[in-house]
Amino acid sequence: MPHAPIALFVYNRPDHTRRAVESMQRNELAANSELHVFSDGPRNQEAVGQVLKVREYIRGIEGFAKLAVYEKDCNQGLAGSVIDGVNRLLEQYGRVIVVEDDLVIAPQFLSFMNVALERYRGDTQVMQVSGHMFPVDVDIDDDAFFLPFTTSWGWGTWARAWKYFDPAAKGHAMLKEDQSRRRVFDMDGAYDYFAMLEAQLAGKVDSWAIRWYLSVFINEGIVLYPRKSLVTNTGFDGSGTHTRGEALDQVVDPDFVPTRLPLPAVNIKVRDQVFAYFRSRRKPMARLRRLAARLAG
């Protein structure tokens, strides 16, 4: 089976884009992988110069089996760009690895993704492979495990799973009526994904990721994660349109090579550890928001 094509989504950050590409080039499988770069059009006149700088760079990328560049004249936004690009590549190749311009990947990222995409290609419950892992120390024998939710920082999927992607988020109605299911969707109350979903439907955000998570959740899908993260997000520097808030305390171990992959089943112990991690982050942030509200009068 040929290696999965890589979809790289870029916009107006030439330095971030260069770092992302250089990290991919350090992967042994880069030379055997096709790189498809999707360049979104400028949102306004101020963005034109940076978009042109990004395009000048991406047109000259080397080190991959094939380079294909898709440049949009108008601005689709990240969600539209990702959905269109993933649709295009899955229709042609049946599987895809997705990277955004603010991600730096470990040298073993492409190997892990390709091995996992091949290993679980026939397991219909498995709907995504994640290269990112939250900064939680887990004590397990395997190098990876399954969790019942998605991430958007360096991931892969198959056409058989993406066919369930519902851009209209019709599952929202069920969650709104069923408080118990809504709590499960919110990681047992550890993270307010439902509020993000409501913001999406109200037009306050434009997120493909919350709709993809909902699609996986409704179909009882599971996601493979590495025991240690193979991805770092460099976008928490104020440069991104969508990356906001605190950066995760993320350190990538360049010597970690995940090879021992588990049978498809949620690891309850790790799931609960991740929930606890998000709860620990949420409490101090909630206190800060309450304090800010009081100070504002």
Image (cartoon, grey):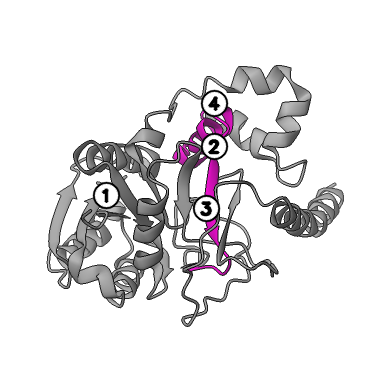
* Residue 13 drawn above or below residue 195: below
Q: What residue type is labelled 2?
A: Gly
Whether residue 262 is visible here, answered yes or no, is yes
Q: Nearer the viewer, mark 4 or mark 2?
A: 2
Q: State how far apart marks 3 and 2 are (Cα).
A: 10 Å
Identify the mark nearer the N-term, 2 or 1: 1
Identify the mark nearer the N-term, 4 or 1: 1
Q: Which of marks 3 and 4 is in front?
A: 3
Q: What residue type is labelled 1?
A: Gln
Local secondary structure at mark 1: helix
Q: Mark 3 points at which residue?
A: 224
Q: Residues within 10 Å of mark 4 (few under 14, many from 20)?
A: some
Residue 38 at what x, y percent from top left?
Answer: 24, 50
Q: Which of marks 4 and 1 is in front?
A: 4
* Residue 145 drawn above or below residue 90: below
Q: Quadrant of residue 246?
A: bottom right
Q: Mark 1 points at which residue?
A: 45
> Who's the residue at 63% across and 71% down the image?
249
Residue 213 covered by magenta stretch: yes
Identify the mark nearer the N-term, 4 or 2: 4
Residue 124 covered by magenta stretch: no
Q: Mark 2 points at which residue?
A: 221
Q: Mark 4 points at which residue?
A: 201
Q: Are marks 2 and 1 in contact (CB under 8 Å)?
A: no
Magenta range:
201-230
Q: State how far apart marks 3 and 4 are (Cα).
A: 28 Å
Residue 69 at what x, y percent from top left?
Answer: 15, 54
